Image (cartoon, rainbow, N blue to C red):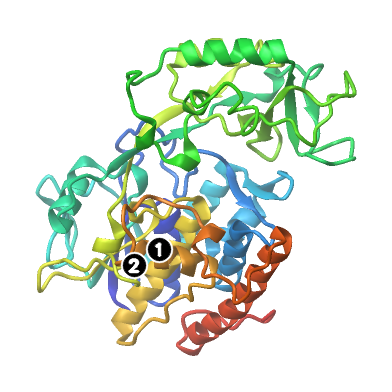
């Protein structure tokens, strides 16, 4: 029954969709413009390359992020499986060795006989499903298309999407944090400790500041030169990934009560809680480099070196990567996509086009992986001639999907999964921990029923743990 499916973009969503569709018996052409075309953020031509943080967020079952990971496990996500195999220590979070992870996914794609990896910059999707670049066909006719081009969708394809959807604007800006080499961190200042932990060794390195050091740092951060003009409005920045300098503009203590909060930490040199703390998280399994947690930035590279070397312990820091600002393209999903993540507004006779990942406005690594799975489910169901079960709104991804595709959603902006989008509980629970536990229990039951429905039509394997 296998069909021919083209997937544009070999990021997290596209790679997951390709692997699942191939497993379901379809022939997949996976088209990726890297490494042939340079980009300001990606460094390699590998599939599923992580470009911001290397953290996939919390594993705790009573968080929205943890609940999403349970969905990936139950539904048999290959990328989640790989992430667990290439995990690096990060407390209660799932962080990965980004190079090993991306190489593993690339190897899986290349080893799959049903997947053909093609390097081209698609700027046109024809009505018969063929893909073109500068008028030249790079992939022949197909039965369905999945667009998973992420935040760096090329100008040509973005224009095709705009023409097809009638969207006026598809772009906002996102920021990535710097990475420093481990051997350039002053270990006489940095201390290893997790928040509220009595253990002597933690998963994070902490760089403490006293009040004077913090105030001076804020002064220099606010005065530093940025890549974009100073009248750039913060409302255009995705709230969950704002540059550190933009957060500082909200108030002198904004960072000290956010990214640089010192609560739950004790400087072993003083035996006291610092005034502020910069946390570093390992970027690889060997701890050769560290990410400045929460320090996404748009400062010019020389300014990043100057200002961030003011942080105690980073005076001689060697930067493996500077922070960058990049364009992020997404569609107005409530108007453009249905609950399958299929485009609603194509001309009659056009092959179906699905979308997955950040192009849909579902932010976050695991959200992208899960949307890739969902798009794959939708494509397979369409090819097989049955209706795909929709994930219940009580589940993590189901709540995000409902927000992203509901015609009741106005002023659409990208989001991660969060409890704010979950349907209310039958009875309000005042205690937050108990309330989140109730959300998790309800989601577990809804997920079990949903997965059973998918298993009944052969899309997923029955879960032995269910």
Mark 2 Cα shell of 10 Å, populated few (<14), some (14-19), many (≥20)? some
Residue 406 marker: 2
Q: Where on the picture, by quarter, is residue 134?
A: top left
In the depicted view, which residue is nearer to us: 443 or 450?
443
Q: Measuring from the top left, give residue 316's x and y in whole percent.
A: 65, 11
Residue shown at 35%/72% (left/top)? 339
Quadrant of the frame with the N terminus: bottom left
Residue 403 marker: 1
Left or right of 47, for residue 228: left
Q: Measuring from the top left, give residue 408's x and y in whole percent.
A: 32, 66
- Above or below 303: residue 29: below
In the depicted view, which residue is nearer to us: 457 or 414?
414
- Above or below 407: residue 273: above
Q: Measuring from the top left, give residue 12's x and y in whole percent.
A: 45, 53
Q: Are marks 2 and 1 in contact (CB under 8 Å)?
A: yes
Left or right of 29, for residue 100: right
Question: From where the camera sits, is residue 371 visible?
Answer: yes
Residue shown at 37%/53% (left/top)? 361
Residue shown at 42%/81% (left/top)? 389
Could you give the CA–CA distance between mark 2 and mark 1, rounded to whole angstroms? 6 Å
């Amino acid at each position: 029954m296998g069909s021919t499916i083209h997937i544009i973009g070999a990021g997290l969503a596209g790679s997951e969709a390709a692997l699942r569709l191939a497993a379901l018996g379809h022939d997949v052409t996976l088209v990726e413009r890297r490494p042939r075309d340079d980009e300001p953020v990606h460094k390699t031509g590998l599939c599923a390359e992580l470009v911001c943080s290397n953290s996939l967020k919390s594993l705790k079952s009573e968080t929205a992020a943890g609940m999403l990971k349970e969905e990936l496990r139950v539904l048999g996500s290959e990328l989640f499986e790989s992430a667990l195999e290439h995990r690096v220590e990060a407390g209660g979070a799932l962080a990965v060795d980004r190079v090993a992870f991306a190489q593993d996914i690339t190897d899986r794609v290349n080893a799959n006989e049903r997947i053909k990896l093609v390097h081209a910059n698609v700027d046109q999707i024809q009505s018969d499903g063929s893909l073109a670049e500068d008028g030249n066909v790079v992939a022949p006719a197909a039965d369905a298309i999945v667009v998973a081009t992420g935040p760096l969708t090329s100008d040509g394809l973005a224009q095709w999407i705009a023409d097809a959807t009638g969207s006026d604007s598809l772009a906002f800006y996102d920021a990535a944090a710097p990475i420093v080499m481990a051997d350039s961190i002053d270990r006489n200042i940095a201390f290893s400790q997790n928040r509220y932990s009595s253990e002597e060794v933690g998963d994070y390195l902490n760089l403490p500041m006293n009040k004077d050091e913090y105030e001076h740092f804020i002064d220099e951060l606010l005065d530093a030169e940025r890549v974009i003009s100073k009248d750039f409005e913060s409302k255009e920045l995705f709230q969950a990934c704002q540059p550190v300098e933009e957060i500082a503009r909200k108030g002198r203590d904004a960072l000290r009560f956010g990214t640089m909060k010192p609560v739950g930490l004790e400087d072993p040199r003083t035996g006291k809680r610092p005034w502020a703390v910069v946390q570093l998280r390992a970027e690889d399994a060997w701890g050769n480099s560290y990410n400045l947690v929460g320090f996404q930035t748009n400062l010019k590279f020389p300014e990043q070196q100057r200002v961030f070397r003011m942080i105690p312990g980073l005076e001689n820091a060697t930067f493996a990567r500077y922070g960058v600002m990049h364009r992020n393209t997404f569609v107005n999903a409530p108007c453009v996509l249905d609950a399958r993540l299929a485009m609603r507004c194509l001309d009659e006779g056009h092959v179906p086009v699905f979308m997955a990942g950040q192009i849909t406005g579902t932010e976050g690594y695991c959200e992208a992986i899960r949307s890739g799975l969902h798009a794959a489910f939708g494509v397979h169901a369409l090819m097989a001639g049955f209706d795909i079960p929709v994930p219940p709104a009580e589940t993590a991804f189901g709540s995000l999907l409902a927000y992203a595709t509901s015609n009741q959603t106005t002023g659409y902006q990208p989001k991660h999964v969060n409890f704010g989008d979950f349907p209310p509980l039958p009875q309000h629970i005042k205690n937050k921990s108990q309330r989140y536990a109730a959300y998790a229990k309800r989601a577990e039951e809804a997920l079990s029923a949903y997965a059973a429905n998918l298993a009944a039509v052969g899309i997923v394997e029955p879960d032995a743990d269910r």
